[in-house]
Amino acid sequence: MALNMVTNGIGQRRAGKRVRDRRRSNRIYYAGGQPPTFLAMWTSRLAVFSALAAIVALTLLGIPVGAWAYSRNWPEINDVSTDLAEPPDFTEAKDERPAGANSVDYPGERFADLQRASYPDLKSLVLPRPADDAYELVLQALGKLKYKTTLELPPETEENAPGFIEFSDHTLVLGLVDDVVIRVLDEDQSSRIDIRSASRYAPFDFGRNAERVRTLLKQIVTRFEASVPDPDRAASKAKLKSAKGRRPASKADRRRPDPSRSSIRRAPGRKASPPGASAGRGPGRSREQYDE
């Protein structure tokens, strides 16, 4: 009897402990062979939604933080020019920029100092060509780069008026718009080309305008070099042509004897008279007289 009482007491204490543990636990228990309750399904889905919301929030928060960290690699400027003393002025961009956009006026000496420190390679391009020829080279370079111009004003050499070309460019990812103006100025049988690129929005451009100016200058120089005749290259091409024209003659190309011209050959028994043999002939004398 005592043994049974002890055994029953142990079972009761264990059962009570299990009930308390279940009440305190956060786990969800499903009965065997029965579908989960609505509350259990909603709790599991809420946990999944919370995790997804946390991931989206961290991603959205990381975009501006990453952009800020990425922008620290470039100066905080959005307007670059090859001529910092007198940057080219925009004409069409004044009407295309809305009220909330950046001003078309050059920001001033602060931007110039930052550009000199960060982009010392951006300088004016001088070509040994008249302004009209340099203007055409610039148009060819823009066509090669697939840019569509919004303003084309050729230079006027007689009035010493520079030429201007304007166009706008869009970024691939965010679609931000940048305005570009190119000035071609005549300088004593040569021409000076200056390029200015400015962003319509944002206080900095992540180095985009400077890279665009480099690409334009490089393409203009490429067009100029392609238009200059190279004497060494022309001479090498001429030698190559002559070498190709002089190939060794084959057996089929050798001239074969023509049967119709066989009478020109001398007979076997007749020998050609030595040179000067007819010098002793007198006037009016025939060959028979000399044979006698």
Image: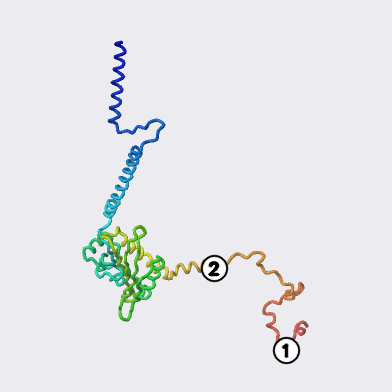
**Whole-percent x and y of residue 128?**
35, 72
| Of residues 211 and 274, the one drawn nearer to the viewer in this rendering | 211
**Whole-percent x and y of residue 51?**
32, 43
> What is the quadrant of residue 107 in the picture?
bottom left
| Of residues 196 and 61, the one drawn nearer to the viewer in this rendering | 61
Badge 1 amino acid: Gly
Q: Residue furthest bottom?
A: 284
Q: Identify the secondary structure beneath mark 2.
A: helix
Badge 2 amino acid: Ser
| Above or below: residue 291 compared with residue 17 | below
Q: Residue at x 31, y 12 (%)?
A: 3
> What is the quadrant of residue 159 in the picture?
bottom left
Q: How is the image coloured?
A: rainbow
* Location of the C terminus (image quadrant): bottom right
**Whole-percent x and y of residue 175?**
34, 60
Q: CA distance from mark 1 to mark 2?
A: 55 Å
Classify 10 Å Cα crowding around label 1: few (below 14), some (14-19), many (20 and above). few
Q: Identify the secondary structure beneath mark 1.
A: loop
* Location of the N terminus (image quadrant): top left
| Of residues 63 and 191, the one drawn nearer to the viewer in this rendering | 63
Report the disc number at residue 31: none
What residue does disc 2 label?
242
Classify 10 Å Cα crowding around label 2: few (below 14), some (14-19), many (20 and above). few
| Above or below: residue 259 compared with residue 278 | above
- The disc, 1 or 2, on the residue closer to the chain's N-terminal end is 2
Report the disc number at residue 284: 1
Q: Residue furthest left?
A: 109
| Of residues 187 and 152, the one drawn nearer to the viewer in this rendering | 152
